[in-house]
Amino acid sequence: MTIVWILLAVAAVAVVFFLMNKKPDDAAALPPADDKPKLPESGGGSKAKEKDKGAAEFFDRPPPKEVPKTRPQAATVKATPVALGGPSKDESSDAEAPKPVESKPPKAEKPRFVEEDFGKPMVFDPATVRKGLAKTRGGFIARLADLFRGRKEIDPSVLRDIEEILLSSDVGVKTTQVLLARLHERLERNELGDEEKVWAALREEALAILGTPGRLKLKEKPTVVLLVGVNGAGKTTTIGKLASKLQAQGKKVVLGAGDTFRAAAVQQLEVWAEREGAEIVKGKEGSDPAAVLFDAVEKAKASGADVVLCDTAGRLQTKTNLMEELAKVRRTIGKALDGAPHETLLVLDATNGQNALQQARLFMEKIELTGVVLTKLDGTAKGGVVLAIAEELKLPVRYIGIGERAEDLREFDPAEFVEALFASRDALDAGAAESAA
Ligand SMILES: Nc1nc2c(ncn2[C@@H]2O[C@H](COP(=O)(O)OP(=O)(O)OP(=O)(O)O)[C@@H](O)[C@H]2O)c(=O)[nH]1
Ligand SMILES: [Mg+2]
C-alpha cells in the first residue's frame, strides 16, 4: 500500500513537472516578436495586458499619447483591413488610391509651356495706372470734363466740341471719327441724356476699341522675344523690366545684346542682367547684331533657359536700312530656333503721340509685329494714342510703361486703363488720400 502511495506521489510529481515544462514549448510556437506589428493589436503589447487587467479604468482615461500619433486618419484606418486581407475594404481603398496619381500629368508629356503668363500675372490695380496717366487725364479728359460740366442737355454741337478735343489729343483722326459716329448713334437713340451718360458712353466705346487684353504668354522653351523701335523709345529699359518680372516668376532669362551700335547700350543691358541675375550674350562693338542674337538663342537652348529677350539698335552705324537689318535679325533668329522669334514687340514712346503711330506704320511695312509696348505714358498728356494704336494699327498693346522702375512696366489691361483714364474726381481724391496715408 505504501508502495502504491509512493508510486502515486512520483506520478503526481512527474505530471506537475511535465506541465511546468510544457508552457515554454507552446510559447516558442508563437510568431516571433518581430511579426507582431502586422497585427492591429500589435501596438498594444504590454499595454494590452494592462487593458485586460483593468479595462473599465483604462477606457475612462484619456487615450494614451501615442494613439493619436500612430492613428491618423482615414487612410491608415482603411489600410488596416487591407493588411488583414479584408476584401471589400481592400477594394474601396484601391479604388480611392489611384485618383491623385491619375490627376498628375506624366512628366514626359510637359516639355513646353502651356500658355503660362509672361512675368507675374497682372494684379488689377487702377490706382497705380491712374497715377501714371495723370498727365493724359489732365489733358483731353480734363477738357472734356470742362465741356460737359453743368450741361443739362447734350446736343449735336457738343459732339462737335468733343471731336475737336479728341483730334487735338492724339486720339487720331480715324479713331475720333469712329468714336464720334458711335456717340451720334447714341444721341439719336436719346442715350446721352446727361453728363454721366456721356461719360459712360465714352468709357464703353473706348473699351470696345481697346478690346480684350492680349497678354504675352510663354509658349515655347525658350520663348524668344525681339524688341524693336527707334532710338530712345525704351527697348533696353523694357527688356530689363521684363527680365525682372520673369526672374521673379522663377524663369531663367537670357538677354541678347543685339544693339551693337554703341558700347553703352551693352553696358546698360549688363547692368540689368547683373541686377536681375540673368545671363547676357554680347558681341564686340560694331559686330553683326543677327549673329549675336543667333548665339543668344543657341545659348538659351543649350542652358535650358525659359526666355530670350533680344535687344536691338534704334539706329545703325552702317548705311544699311534699319528695317532691312531688323528683318534679317528675325530671319537669323528663326534659323537658330524654328518659329522664333515668337514675339516681335514694337516699342513706342507715347510722348511722340501721332508720330509714334507713323513710326509704327513704317515698321509694320517691313517687319511682322505681334504687339506694342507703349512707354513713358507717365510723362505725357498724349495717352490717347493708345486708342489710335488699337483702332488704326490693329496691334495689341502688350505693355505700358508708366515710370522708370521695373514695376512701372504693366501688362496692358483695357479695363484697368479705361478705369484709370476716366477716373472720376471721387476716385482721384481717394487715390490721393491713399498715397498720402
Ligand atoms: N518716365 C519713363 N521713362 C522711361 C520709360 N521707359 C523708358 N524710359 C526711359 O527712356 C530712356 C530711353 O530708354 P532706353 O531703354 O535706353 O531706350 P532704347 O529704345 O533702348 O534706346 P536706344 O538704345 O538708343 O535705341 C531711359 O532713360 C529710360 O529710363 C517709362 O515708361 N517712363
Ligand atoms: Mg537700347
Image (tube, rainbow, N blue to C red):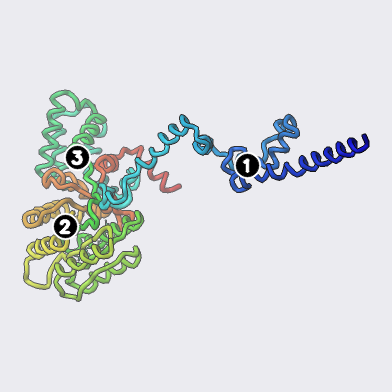
Q: Amino acid at mark 3?
A: Gly
Instruction: Give the side of residue 94 with respect to residue 356, left or right.
Output: right
Q: Which residue is mark 1?
A: 43
| Distance between mark 3 and mark 2 Cα atoms | 26 Å
Of badges 1 and 3, nearer the viewer stands: 1
**Label 2 neighbour load within 10 Å: few <14, some 14-19, many 20+:** many
Front one among 6 and 118: 6
Asked whether the beta carbons under mark 3 and mark 2 sit within 8 Å of each other, the answer is no
* Residue in view at x 11 percent, y 37 percent: 178
Secondary structure beneath dot 2 equals loop
Q: Amino acid at mark 1?
A: Gly
Question: Relative to residue 205, is residue 409 depicted above or below?
Answer: below
Looking at the image, tell me whether mark 3 or mark 2 is earlier in sequence order: 3
Question: Relative to residue 88, is residue 218 depicted above or below?
Answer: below
* Residue in view at x 24 percent, y 30 percent: 195
Looking at the image, tell me whether mark 1 or mark 3 is earlier in sequence order: 1
| Distance between mark 1 and mark 3 Cα atoms | 67 Å
| Residue 187 point in image, percent of width and height | 15, 27
Q: Which residue is mark 3?
A: 211
Asked whether the beta carbons under mark 1 and mark 3 sit within 8 Å of each other, the answer is no
Q: Which residue is mark 2?
A: 340
| Residue 322 point in image, percent of width and height | 10, 65
Is label 3 within 8 A of ligand 1 (CB to nearest ligand atom)? no
Answer with the quarter of the image where residue 186 lies.
Answer: top left
| Distance between mark 1 and mark 2 Cα atoms | 63 Å
Give the mark count: 3
Front one among 78 and 329: 78
* Residue in view at x 15 percent, y 32 percent: 183
